[in-house]
Amino acid sequence: MPRMKSRATRLALGAVVLGGLTALASGGLASAAPLAEGVVYTQTNATSGNSVQVFLRQANGTLIPGGAFATGGTGTGGTGLSQGSVELSADGHTLVAVNAGSSQISDFTVTRDGGLRLINTISSGGTEPISVAIDGSLVEVLNIGGTANVAGFAATSFGLIPIAGASQPLSSGASGAEDVTISPDGSHAVVTEKTSNTIDTFAIGSGGTLAPVVTSPSDGPGAFASVFTHDGRLLVADAGGSGASALSPYQVDVDGTVAATGPALPNAQSAACWITLGKGGNVFVANAGSSSISTYRVLHNGSVGFFGNFNAGAGAKPLDLATAPNGRFLYELDGVNHVISAFAVGPVGQLTAISQQPIPASAVGLAAG
């Protein structure tokens, strides 16, 4: 799909008007807020009206509240959404959030101060959207209700627009779909399915159209969330059984077939669900059943190695992860203590707890910029 220009030009004009941290009726952070080095986003997933919460990242990695921005849709009130329910574009200018309760998605422009301006809220192209992936101007949405599908949208200056021919159902045996990602070359959308132990791929054609599904078995049980490395390797968190979680490496062939490139790498933890990339080859996996975060590393020869497990907090249930763009900090959404926990990332991926920020009990999703 030809890449549209990002919203950077329009943002630059807005920045001239803003001139810094000013308060805006349409969305902006309070003028009293200190200058931040970055932002972290989550969503409330509230049934009475969903909103995206903003936290300002300070130089030492700690977070301070930066406001909430209504999505125009509703959530489910639960914590069952998956990785990608709040997604930030690579250039940091666009944020998309799902509204699983109203089957809609919301498109925001990120302002200079990290605040949000709602562009539009539209149908997700299906029922109960739980995960979004962004690649340039292309947005893919995973809907799991009714006939589960993947639907494609174009991000334009007027908001998200459905792409004709860009909606495809998941495979007939697919069950427990959790996450949608887009390959680095923009050739395939990939969906992991934890119950059927399958991985579905859809070739992305001209203009963002989607080809019919190609299905492959996952190498390990409980294929949950996934992430692509910069060189195109697909890494999947395998929930497995008790004490049998792992990370599995794959490649996506031209025809959409997914094949393991090495054995699954166990971490002796339980319910490995969410996964994110860091800097320097770091890969972090959240183990919801073990109150822990595992560190893996992509080595220079392309293989993946297990580094170790780190405590996610007393009684924690890590439900999502996000890394700061500088790679120095990792953020964890804790679904039991209802906080976002901040960790400093050491030279070889070791984690040191820094601080916590309270969030609503229904909060889901993390994105960091």
Image (spheres, rainbow, N blue to C red):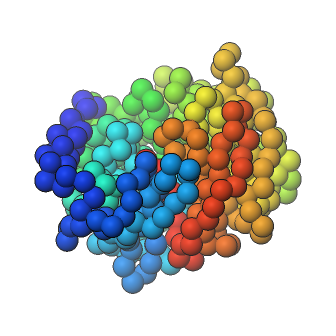
Query: Residue 212 appears in which quarter of the rendering?
Result: top left
Q: Residue 352 vs residue 147: left or right? A: right
Q: Residue 43 vs residue 267: left or right? A: left
Residue at (67% x, 73% y) in the render: 337
Residue 328 point in image, percent of width and height: 58, 41
Quarter of the image where the N terminus is located: top left
Whether residue 103 is visible to the viewer of this picture, yes or no, is no
Whether residue 90 is visible to the viewer of this picture, yes or no, is yes
Residue 180 point in image, percent of width and height: 49, 47
In the foreground, 153 or 256:
153
In the foreground, 85 or 313:
313
Residue at (25% x, 32% y) in the render: 3
Residue 128 point in image, percent of width and height: 44, 66
- Furthest residue to the bottom? 48
Query: Residue 295 appears in which quarter of the rendering?
Result: top right
Residue 350 point in image, percent of width and height: 73, 41
- Residue 51 against residue 35 in the figure, above or below: below
Residue at (57% x, 68% y) in the render: 357
- Residue 88 against residue 264 in the figure, above or below: below
Query: How many marks can you see?
Result: 0
Residue at (77% x, 69% y) in the render: 315
In the foreground, 221 or 338:
338
